[in-house]
Image: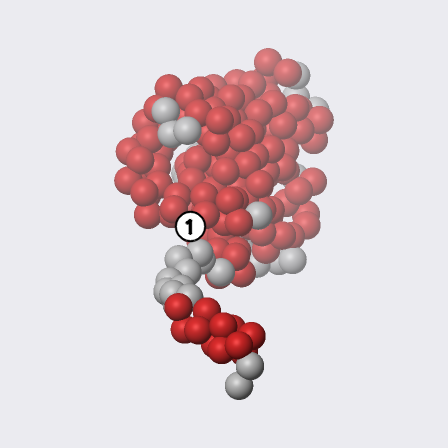
Amino acid sequence: MSNTKIFILAKEKMEPIKPQYPTTQTDPSTLQLKRMVYASLMAALTAAGAYIAIPVGPVPIVLQNLFVMLAGLLLGGRWGLISIGVYLLAGAVGLPVFAGGTGGVGKFVGPTGGYLLGFVAAAYLIGVFSERGRGRVVVDILAMTAGTIVIYAFGVTWLKMVTGMSFSKAVAVGMLPFLIGDALKIAVAIPIARALRPMIDGSLRAAQAAG
């Protein structure tokens, strides 16, 4: 055996074996699936909230907007929007997920159609604000307040157009009776969000980092 071959074999024996450490990175497809599950769950909860309805004129009191707020707070702007979009799509194809167990495309052109569309915009807005606020309570409250204003901007305007009411009348029947309830929903959403965030934030933030 030549001196060159002996040197190469000796060098290979002297080189330390590099340890193989298990990777801790989560599969991005798994994280994506988790976000889809969370979005679907919030869509289902929003539908469930529609069944708790108190009729007070053309616009009933419901818990839908509580879950719209939570969708934005917990899922962020993009996935909050997707979640409520899934909810509206389910209602549009006829599933009984709207207030009072109703559904169908006709609900979008009825007196409450503006509120339904406002849910999507509100979930996105709340989510964007919440993401930037990094869980600060004051920011979350402001985000939900802004989202509520957006819902009423869509809802009252559409109610006025569909029913032919004056603007003051539309505000009187389509906003004022619900303000105290909305304040209570905001107060309830804060501790719920603070309790649930630790359970879902890890996977969501990991998915964002992987993306």
Q: Can you identify the residue that label 1 sits on?
A: 203
Q: Residue furthest top?
A: 168
Q: Residue at x 55, y 81 (%)?
A: 2
Quarter holding residue 121:
top right
Disc 1 residue type (three-letter): Ser
Residue drawn at x 56%, y 18% is 171
> How far across and how far down the image is residue 21, in percent?
37, 62
The answer to whether residue 183 of the structure is visible from this angle is no
Secondary structure state at the residue bearing disc 1: helix
Compared with 165, 34 (above or below) is: below
Q: Which is nearer the eye, 139 or 153? A: 139
**Relative vertical location of residue 179 with respect to residue 49 in this rendering, above or below:** above
Q: Is residue 5 above or below residue 141?
A: below
Determine the residue located farthest toward the front in the rendered image. 3
Query: Percent x, y for residue 24?
Result: 39, 57
- Quarter of the image where one finds residue 4: bottom right
Give the image location of residue 97, x and y in percent: 52, 52
